[in-house]
Amino acid sequence: MLSAAAQGIGSESPFALTRYRRFGWGVFAASGALGAGLVFFWTAYRMGWYGQDLLALRLGVQVLSGIVLGGLLAKVIVRALERTGVLADFAIGAADAAPIPERRVR
């Protein structure tokens, strides 16, 4: 529960700081980095990683992984969903959305 809370707080913070109005690559990357970074410190405490030689390397790999998987890959998925139009009623879909052409049924 604590790991999930730390990750959720870290992941939502960049969006909350922009008042859920900016959904660019940087915001997504910051979301992934903070989500992974915050959960890292709790995990390091639980697993006894503090004092180990590889602590900085573990942090770097986890934050980089968070940026790629939790940030940039999430942005790619959001872009794909935007093209379908399913996000049009949400702030994230309305931020960069071009109007979807209406189809007329004959």
Image: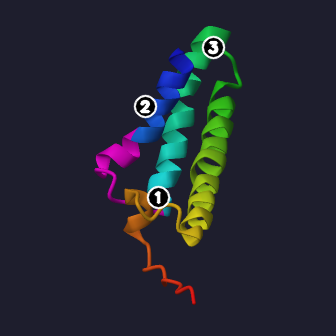
Q: Is residue 23 visible?
A: no
19 above or below 99?
above
* Residue occupying the point 68% across, 38% down: 61
The residue type indicated by label 1 comes to Gly
Instruction: Determine whether the residue tagged by mark 1 lies in a helix, strand or loop.
Output: helix
Instruction: Say which residue label 2 marks.
Output: 9
Give residue 5's position: percent from left, percent from top.
48, 23
Would you call the spot at circle 3 few (<14 residues within 10 Å), some (14-19), or many (20 or more)?
few
Q: Seen from this angle, which residue lies furthest right?
A: 54
Q: Seen from this angle, which residue lies furthest front?
A: 106
When asked about the image quadrant of residue 92, the answer is bottom left
The residue type indicated by label 2 comes to Ile
Q: Nearer the viewer, mark 3 or mark 1?
A: 1
Q: Is residue 46 visible?
A: yes
Residue stretch rendered in magenta on the structure: 13-24
* Residue occupying the point 55% across, 20% down: 3
Instruction: Say which residue label 3 marks.
Output: 51
* Residue occupying the point 62% across, 58% down: 77
Instruction: Determine whether the residue tagged by mark 3 lies in a helix, strand or loop.
Output: loop
Front residue of this view, candidates 8 and 36: 8
63 above or below 20?
above
Give the CA separation, mark 1 to mark 2.
17 Å
32 above or below 75?
above
Instruction: Say which residue label 1 marks.
Output: 26
Q: Nearer the viewer, mark 1 or mark 2?
A: 2
Front residue of this view, candidates 61 and 4: 4
